[in-house]
Image: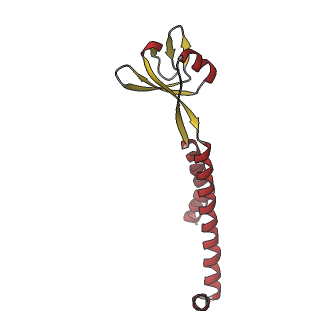
Amino acid sequence: MLYYRRSRFLRRVILPITLLSFLSACHKWVELKPPYEQAFAEEQPEKVRLTVVGNSRLVLEEPRVQGDTLFGLSRRTGVPLDQIQRAEVRQDDMVANVFLITGIAVTVGLLVYGAIEGRRVMAEGLGAWLGELAED
Protein backbone atom coordinates (compact mmCIF):
# COMPACT_ATOMS: atom_id res chain seq x y z
CA MET A 1 0.00 0.00 0.00
CA LEU A 2 2.87 2.34 0.79
CA TYR A 3 4.34 1.80 -2.69
CA TYR A 4 1.01 2.66 -4.28
CA ARG A 5 0.78 5.91 -2.34
CA ARG A 6 4.34 6.84 -3.29
CA SER A 7 3.76 6.18 -6.97
CA ARG A 8 0.48 8.13 -6.91
CA PHE A 9 2.23 11.04 -5.20
CA LEU A 10 4.97 10.84 -7.82
CA ARG A 11 2.49 10.96 -10.70
CA ARG A 12 0.26 13.67 -9.30
CA VAL A 13 2.73 16.06 -7.74
CA ILE A 14 6.37 15.57 -8.62
CA LEU A 15 6.09 14.85 -12.35
CA PRO A 16 3.99 17.95 -13.21
CA ILE A 17 6.30 20.16 -11.16
CA THR A 18 9.31 18.70 -12.94
CA LEU A 19 7.75 19.20 -16.37
CA LEU A 20 6.77 22.78 -15.59
CA SER A 21 10.29 23.54 -14.40
CA PHE A 22 11.59 22.79 -17.90
CA LEU A 23 9.61 25.75 -19.24
CA SER A 24 12.07 28.10 -17.62
CA ALA A 25 14.84 26.45 -19.61
CA CYS A 26 13.47 27.77 -22.90
CA HIS A 27 15.31 31.03 -23.22
CA LYS A 28 17.87 32.71 -25.40
CA TRP A 29 20.48 35.39 -24.92
CA VAL A 30 19.97 38.52 -27.02
CA GLU A 31 22.83 40.96 -27.55
CA LEU A 32 22.41 44.56 -26.44
CA LYS A 33 23.79 47.37 -28.55
CA PRO A 34 25.91 50.15 -27.08
CA PRO A 35 25.58 52.61 -25.40
CA TYR A 36 24.99 50.19 -22.54
CA GLU A 37 23.82 52.83 -20.05
CA GLN A 38 20.78 53.54 -22.21
CA ALA A 39 20.21 49.85 -23.07
CA PHE A 40 20.15 48.80 -19.39
CA ALA A 41 17.80 51.67 -18.53
CA GLU A 42 15.37 50.72 -21.31
CA GLU A 43 15.48 46.93 -20.93
CA GLN A 44 15.76 46.64 -17.12
CA PRO A 45 16.75 42.97 -17.45
CA GLU A 46 16.70 40.38 -14.66
CA LYS A 47 20.02 38.96 -15.80
CA VAL A 48 22.78 40.16 -18.05
CA ARG A 49 25.68 38.12 -19.39
CA LEU A 50 28.80 40.16 -19.93
CA THR A 51 31.97 39.54 -21.86
CA VAL A 52 34.62 41.88 -20.56
CA VAL A 53 38.14 42.77 -21.65
CA GLY A 54 40.25 39.61 -21.56
CA ASN A 55 37.31 37.47 -22.79
CA SER A 56 36.12 36.59 -19.30
CA ARG A 57 32.38 36.11 -18.87
CA LEU A 58 30.14 36.77 -15.92
CA VAL A 59 26.40 36.92 -15.26
CA LEU A 60 24.93 39.71 -13.15
CA GLU A 61 21.44 39.58 -11.68
CA GLU A 62 19.35 42.75 -11.65
CA PRO A 63 22.08 44.96 -13.11
CA ARG A 64 22.09 48.67 -12.28
CA VAL A 65 24.27 51.42 -13.70
CA GLN A 66 25.77 53.80 -11.17
CA GLY A 67 28.00 56.39 -12.68
CA ASP A 68 30.27 54.63 -15.16
CA THR A 69 30.01 51.18 -13.52
CA LEU A 70 27.55 48.30 -13.83
CA PHE A 71 26.63 46.55 -10.57
CA GLY A 72 24.61 43.39 -9.95
CA LEU A 73 22.83 42.12 -6.85
CA SER A 74 24.24 38.60 -6.84
CA ARG A 75 27.83 39.73 -7.19
CA ARG A 76 28.91 42.74 -5.27
CA THR A 77 31.44 43.61 -7.88
CA GLY A 78 31.22 46.40 -10.36
CA VAL A 79 32.23 46.29 -13.98
CA PRO A 80 33.31 49.55 -15.61
CA LEU A 81 31.15 50.17 -18.67
CA ASP A 82 34.21 50.80 -20.85
CA GLN A 83 35.49 47.28 -20.02
CA ILE A 84 32.35 45.58 -21.44
CA GLN A 85 32.97 44.07 -24.87
CA ARG A 86 29.57 42.40 -25.18
CA ALA A 87 26.34 42.46 -23.15
CA GLU A 88 23.46 40.02 -23.56
CA VAL A 89 20.09 39.82 -21.82
CA ARG A 90 18.10 36.66 -21.18
CA GLN A 91 14.72 36.50 -22.91
CA ASP A 92 12.09 33.79 -23.05
CA ASP A 93 12.00 31.85 -26.31
CA MET A 94 8.29 31.50 -27.10
CA VAL A 95 8.87 29.21 -30.10
CA ALA A 96 10.79 26.73 -27.96
CA ASN A 97 8.09 26.94 -25.27
CA VAL A 98 5.37 26.14 -27.83
CA PHE A 99 7.33 23.14 -29.13
CA LEU A 100 7.98 21.92 -25.58
CA ILE A 101 4.32 22.17 -24.57
CA THR A 102 3.21 20.53 -27.82
CA GLY A 103 5.69 17.69 -27.31
CA ILE A 104 4.50 17.14 -23.75
CA ALA A 105 0.85 17.15 -24.87
CA VAL A 106 1.52 14.64 -27.66
CA THR A 107 3.48 12.39 -25.30
CA VAL A 108 0.73 12.46 -22.69
CA GLY A 109 -1.87 11.76 -25.38
CA LEU A 110 0.09 8.75 -26.64
CA LEU A 111 0.53 7.43 -23.11
CA VAL A 112 -3.21 7.76 -22.41
CA TYR A 113 -4.05 6.07 -25.71
CA GLY A 114 -1.60 3.27 -24.93
CA ALA A 115 -3.11 2.76 -21.49
CA ILE A 116 -6.67 2.63 -22.88
CA GLU A 117 -5.66 0.29 -25.69
CA GLY A 118 -3.74 -1.91 -23.26
CA ARG A 119 -6.78 -2.24 -20.99
CA ARG A 120 -8.98 -3.12 -23.99
CA VAL A 121 -6.54 -5.80 -25.08
CA MET A 122 -6.41 -7.23 -21.57
CA ALA A 123 -10.21 -7.20 -21.31
CA GLU A 124 -10.90 -8.80 -24.69
CA GLY A 125 -7.92 -11.07 -24.70
CA LEU A 126 -4.78 -11.03 -26.75
CA GLY A 127 -6.21 -13.41 -29.35
CA ALA A 128 -9.04 -11.04 -30.32
CA TRP A 129 -6.61 -8.16 -30.65
CA LEU A 130 -4.22 -10.17 -32.82
CA GLY A 131 -7.19 -11.21 -34.96
CA GLU A 132 -8.03 -7.55 -35.60
CA LEU A 133 -4.45 -6.95 -36.70
CA ALA A 134 -4.56 -9.89 -39.09
CA GLU A 135 -7.79 -8.56 -40.70
CA ASP A 136 -6.27 -5.12 -41.34
Vertical order, 79 against 122 (above or below): above
Vertical order, 59 against 130 (above or below): above
Residue at 36% from the left image edge and 25% from the top image edge: 55
Q: Position of residue 65 (x, y in %)?
A: 55, 14
Image-quadrant location for residue 2? bottom right
Vertical order, 72 against 125 (above or below): above
Protein image colouring: secondary structure
Quadrant containing the N terminus in the rendered view: bottom right
Vertical order, 58 against 78 (above or below): below
Q: Which residue is situated farthest in the top direction here?
A: 67
Image-quadrant location for residue 121? bottom right
Quadrant containing the C terminus in the rendered view: bottom right
Q: Is residue 28 left or right of residue 83?
A: right
Residue at 53% from the left image edge and 23% from the top image edge: 33
Q: Position of residue 26 (x, y in %)?
A: 55, 43
Q: Position of residue 97 (x, y in %)?
A: 60, 47
Residue at 54% from the left image edge and 64% from the top image edge: 3
Residue at 63% from the left image edge and 50% from the top image edge: 98
Q: Can the viewer see residue 9?
A: no
Image-quadrant location for residue 127? bottom right
Foreground of the two, 75 or 6: 75
Q: Position of residue 53 (x, y in %)?
A: 37, 19
Q: Which residue is situated farthest in the left direction here?
A: 54
Q: Is residue 8 left or right of residue 75?
A: right
